[in-house]
Image (cartoon, helix red, strand yellow):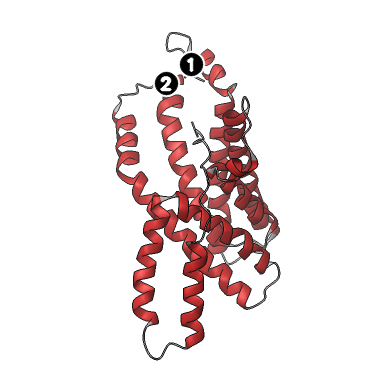
């Protein structure tokens, strides 16, 4: 939906804005950031296992699921794709992963990627929708700074997300080796997710290749046991082995 008409009173413009589904999407991202902030604060205070901390952790992923659900509704409300195409939609993939973390044991490293995406969505929506609604010029110094920041850092932070997702994959893999509860299910789901990210995302491809070069240079050392070398070979084959199928239409997030 287009931003409220500038000629209308401020109160009416704000009312028009908050009634939109897109504003609910924006609010969801705000709550993602709040949840991440309060859970991280609990971790810093060495109390991530408290009921309050668990609440904010769950609240974060409920908010993530709501935001992606809104995007999927707007994308497919008039034409529902087949199952294969649907599962290859980025929004579906991240929604499934959010559901996985929602029902899993809280883990701080699951949060940064979603926080980064929400941060940039909130910035962009604030500049393009909230500012006009409250009568703040779109070419104001603050709006211009926001636009410049997004243009300058969006790709850099997306690269960071790709690396964070690989860090999380390593963490889950280690949990599986230690036979921690639910870790093999998490590895199966998240591993499949990462295979698709490798196929569909240029940022993930770049991150995997950078990691591959660095780890290959370490793994060839004679002191590294054969099982570790074989394990690394299998991990690379798994990540790069996603089947090639037609991609789903790109979903809009704004």
Q: Nearer the viewer, residue 95 or 51?
A: 95
Q: Mark 2 Cα within 10 Å, few/some/many (few <14, many 20+)?
A: many
Measuring from the top left, give residue 224's x and y in whole percent: 43, 87
Q: Nearer the viewer, residue 251 or 44?
A: 251
* Cα separation between marks 1 and 2: 8 Å
Is 77 located above or below residue 231 in the figure?
Answer: above
Q: Mark 1 or 2 closer to N-term?
A: 1
Helix, strand or loop at label 1? It is loop
- In the picture of the structure, the residue carrying the numbered disc 1 is 4
Measuring from the top left, give residue 239's x and y in whole percent: 50, 63
Is 102 located above or below residue 143 in the figure?
Answer: below
Left or right, residue 181 beside residue 2? right
* Residue 42 in view in this figure: no
| Residue at 63% in and 27% down | 77
Measuring from the top left, give residue 59's x and y in whole percent: 65, 47
| Residue at 47% in and 63% down | 166
Helix, strand or loop at label 2? It is helix
- In the picture of the structure, the residue carrying the numbered disc 2 is 132
Left or right, residue 133 beside residue 80? left
Farthest residue to the top: give it: 7
Measuring from the top left, give residue 201's x and y in whole percent: 43, 50
Q: Mark 1 Cα within 10 Å, few/some/many (few <14, many 20+)?
A: many
Label 1–label 2 contact, CB within 8 A: yes
Left or right, residue 88 beside residue 217? right
* Residue 202 in view in this figure: yes
Left or right, residue 50 beside residue 201? right
| Residue at 52% in and 43% down | 246
């Amino acid at each position: 939906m287009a931003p409220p008409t500038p000629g209308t009173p401020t109160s009416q413009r704000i009312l028009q804005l908050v009634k939109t589904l897109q504003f609910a999407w924006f609010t969801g991202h705000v709550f993602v950031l709040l949840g991440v902030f309060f859970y991280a604060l609990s971790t810093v205070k060495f109390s991530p296992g408290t009921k309050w901390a668990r609440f904010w952790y769950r609240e974060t992923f409920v908010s993530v699921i709501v935001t992606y659900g809104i995007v999927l509704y707007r994308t497919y409300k008039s034409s529902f794709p087949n199952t294969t195409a649907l599962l290859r939609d980025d929004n579906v993939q991240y929604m499934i992963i959010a559901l996985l973390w929602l029902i899993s044991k809280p883990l701080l490293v699951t949060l940064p990627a979603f926080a980064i995406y929400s941060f940039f969505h909130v910035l962009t929506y604030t500049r393009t929708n909230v500012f006009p609604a409250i009568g703040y010029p779109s070419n104001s110094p603050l709006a211009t700074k926001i636009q410049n920041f997004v243009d300058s850092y969006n790709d850099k932070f997306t690269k960071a997300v790709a690396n964070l997702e690989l860090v999380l994959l390593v963490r889950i893999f280690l949990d599986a080796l230690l036979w921690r509860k639910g870790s093999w299910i998490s590895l199966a789901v998240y591993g499949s997710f990462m295979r698709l990210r490798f196929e569909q995302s240029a940022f993930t491809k770049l991150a995997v290749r950078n990691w591959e070069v660095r780890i290959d240079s370490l793994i060839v050392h004679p002191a590294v046991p054969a099982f570790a070398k074989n394990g690394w070979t299998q991990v690379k084959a798994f990540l790069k082995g996603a089947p090639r199928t037609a991609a789903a239409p790109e979903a809009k997030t704004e």
